[in-house]
Amino acid sequence: MSAPIQIGTDQSDRPVIIDVEELLATRLLVQGNSGSGKSHLLRRILEESAGIVQQVVIDPEGDFVTLADVFGHIVVDGAAYSAAELTRLAARIRQHRASVVLALDGLEIEAQMRCAALFLSALFDAPREQWFPALVVVDEAQMFAPAVAGEVSDEARRLSLAAMTNLMCRGRKRGLAGIVATQRLAKLAKNVAAEASNFLMGRTFLDIDMARAADLLGMERRQAEQIRDLARGEFLGLGPAISRRPVAVRIGAVRTGARVMVQKLAPPPTASPDALHALLHEDLHLDEAAPPAPPPAPMVPAADELLEQIAAVPLDAVEPVEQPQLFAPSQAEIDLAVDRILIDMAAEEGCTFQTPAKLFQDFSVRCRMQRLTAGHVDMATFRRRFAMAVAGVSDEPGGPWQDILRVAQPLADDLLAPFLVIARAAQQGLPCPDDDELARVYGTSSPGRIRRLIDHYERSGLIVVRTDFSGRRSVSIPELGLATEPLEA
């Protein structure tokens, strides 16, 4: 089952789609400096997916409460309820699959962290029969999962960080898909950011944040400069739910807005200095003990009333989405997936001319997009297996290439691919590969380097080169008793 939503358009005005079902399994990280359009992006995702999946928004600034006006979200004022009442509310939210906004703007930062931790933990601890899929959006996530200790108490930081880690690391099998947004990656705890497989990176200026964003997007460091040039509302997206390659997206329009809008520039009043002085100092002598009555506070529903409101949400108000299965591949499946990735990379034109570091970075991104980790293959193993993929040779146990790989064992990884190409031709009775083919496999444009490489193979005792009187070259591998056919001059 697929549940696509459009979040915007790319540079060619083609729609950019997020697959909500895939997002439930792979999570999302949004990063961008203040004013880059993070909240607008989150609002677009929430609005477009409101009819598809349950939503829970942790809103430290009260920006998303307006979703209630159009989409029927229930607003929970975190400052108005006790810890026990919040726990009951969270339990009912999971039971009845109500979409809610937890507004924390009436609390200080430490109280916000405690309240969010309690709420998220209660969502996480729901009984198994209530593990329905839900998007859990956390704005300003660096407040709830800080990378370093701040001015809040250690206990509050520990509770909040544990709840955020549970959401991102273990929430998937409970149906909770985390979407975290942060102003700075460097301020967000790494174990929270690392669990996201989808990324939307907005404008940022600090080098450390640009470098981390570029690493997550699989870009070279010199390409990270383009992150600084993104306009407001423009993001670079990557991930299995968005795109296989980094794509630039301009976020589309939304139907709701923040409760408090930033005012545009307005000139100061034109009153004379004397008039302004009089206005500022008028009646300063009045009794300070009788301040004007404050405006009436808005009515906040009691906990029992809000619980009844949540229970009144019909269970069919949100279209059910099939719960994604936990992806737990076996070692054989991992090896097969890695082999496919290496074969795809080896088939790309000019791949051998790229640096090993760039190739390994590309490999890591592709693994992450298939919910694997590049940790299954380190850099040294990758270079050897990539050389085998370029040469069309596999290390399948009992396969036809085992003897060839045994003979090639002493070779350094960067010298392996051309020898394997020659050995494969010898085993299959094909003509000896020409210098151009060996140069392509080796990743060079110099014929002299190929001649020196063949000389090195021969001096090492791996091959014997024979050139007949008509100038045709053939190569034999004495240890295996194999030889290529002569190459036409």
Image: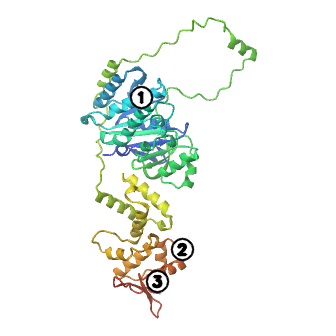
Q: Is residue 357 left or right of residue 271?
A: left
Identify the residue at image location x=37%, y=44%.
Answer: 23
Give the amino acid at mark 3.
Arg
| Depicted 424 relative to depicted 373: above or below | below
Q: Are marks 3 and 2 in contact (CB under 8 Å)?
A: no
Q: Is residue 354 visible?
A: yes
Q: Which residue is mark 2?
A: 445
Q: Residues within 10 Å of mark 2 (few under 14, many from 20)?
A: some
Task: Tell me if label 1 and label 3 are in contact, CB under 8 Å.
Answer: no
Real-space Cα distance between discs 1 and 3? 70 Å
Label annotation for residue 377 = none
Coordinates of residue 417 in the picture (x, y in percent) = 43, 72
Please state which amino acid type lies under the numbered disc 1. Arg
- Give how far across and how far down residue 186 sits, in percent: 51, 43
Q: Which residue is mark 3?
A: 459
Nearest to N terminus: mark 1 or mark 2: 1
Tell me, yes or no, whether the two marked residues, 1 and 2, touch with CB atoms within 8 Å. no
Q: Which residue is mark 1?
A: 114
Pick whichever of labels 3 and 2 is earlier in the sequence: 2
Q: Residues within 10 Å of mark 1 (few under 14, many from 20)?
A: some
